[in-house]
Amino acid sequence: MFIDRAKIHVKAGDGGRGCVSFRREKFVPKGGPDGGDGGRGGDIILEVDPNLSTLIDFKYKPFYRAKNGEHGKGKKMKGKDAPPLILKVPPGTVVKDAETGEVIVDLTEPGQRFVLAKGGRGGRGNVHFVKPWRQAPRIAEPGEKGEERTVILELKLIADVGLVGLPNAGKSTLLSRISAAKPAIADYPFTTLYPVLGVVRVGEHESFVVADIPGIIEGAHKGAGLGLEFLRHIERTKLILQLVDLSGFEVDPFKAFEIVEKEMKNYGADLHIKPRIVVGTKVDLLKDEGIIKEFGDFVKEKGFDFVAISAVTGKNLDVLIKKCWQMLRSLKGEGSGETKENKEDLELTHQKASG
């Protein structure tokens, strides 16, 4: 089960109390104080585990408590520090304060750690309280309380490319054709109920990651449909593919484009100004292919690249993958690699994609 949001309460361990003790040995009946310090309470640490992809464990176990430090002992023996409690989270986990909503930390790198709650310091034993006027102190400190807080964990998938569009725009079909991902595919809205990641191979040693999210409907930014819950998963993407069904069986392509454009803009997080390729889908169902040029011209006037494809027949999928890879390389600062031959190839690619 995919869970991308959870509220948890954490309590770090308390420090152990200091010890009140006096040295008592043969021939030393009145030895001085020798009470040791208490051990430190255990921290609660979040650690990024690249093998995880969901927050499901936190959904069903919302409370975590680290162990307390051991109390100090005689003979100046310090209590044992408690071990940290390490909570594993998937890459892309954002930690927010439950009361204020403020972002505490954004965990993205494998192995990255963050101390969410610090354990309490151990109390000092009576050996620390000797004064010239007080040679046999019978006082020691209690351990400090460990930090306690309630936080919200939100998962934002880390992908290079995000697929957006109305339900039934063909996002899942496209992902299944260009990657090894196996999303649910059917001829009705909201087949995709949770985000799906797919790795697209480009040559032998290069690849990029694509995220498919549930379809966006009008009013998604206000909570309608499933899009609002999952739009955050494309916040991290470098490139957006906006899919539009050119067959127009359910929604006019021009209207479909404007609906998604409006929802991304109203959602915020600068989604609408991210680099974007508009993808016209289901061209295999078209009786009149004039819509490809008409819609393509409309998109280009908006300032976006356009590719018309059929995920069913495979038409122009290679063109789309190549264009995505070139844009991603450019965005990563690796250059477009536009040699003279490449430039001619790009022009042919663009002409082919535009139909």
Image (spheres, rainbow, N blue to C red):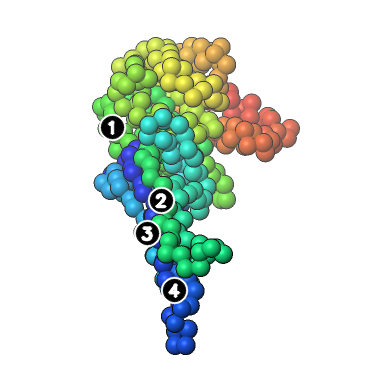
Please state which amino acid type lies under the numbered disc 2. Answer: Gly
Label drawn at residue 68: 3
Residue for badge 2: 146
Q: Nearer the viewer, residue 298 or 10?
A: 10
Q: Residues within 10 Å of mark 1 (few under 14, many from 20)?
A: some
Q: Position of residue 173 (x, y in %)?
A: 36, 34
Looking at the image, the residue that sits furthest to the bottom is 27
Q: Secondary structure at mark 1?
A: loop
Label drawn at residue 3: none
Spatial separation of the CA atoms under disc 3 and disc 2 = 8 Å
Residue for badge 4: 22
* Circles 3, 2 touching at the beta carbon (< 8 Å): yes
Q: Residue at x 41, y 35 (%)?
A: 97
Q: Secondary structure at mark 3?
A: loop
Q: Residues within 10 Å of mark 3 (few under 14, many from 20)?
A: many
Please state which amino acid type lies under the numbered disc 1. Answer: Thr
Spatial separation of the CA atoms under disc 2 and disc 4 = 29 Å
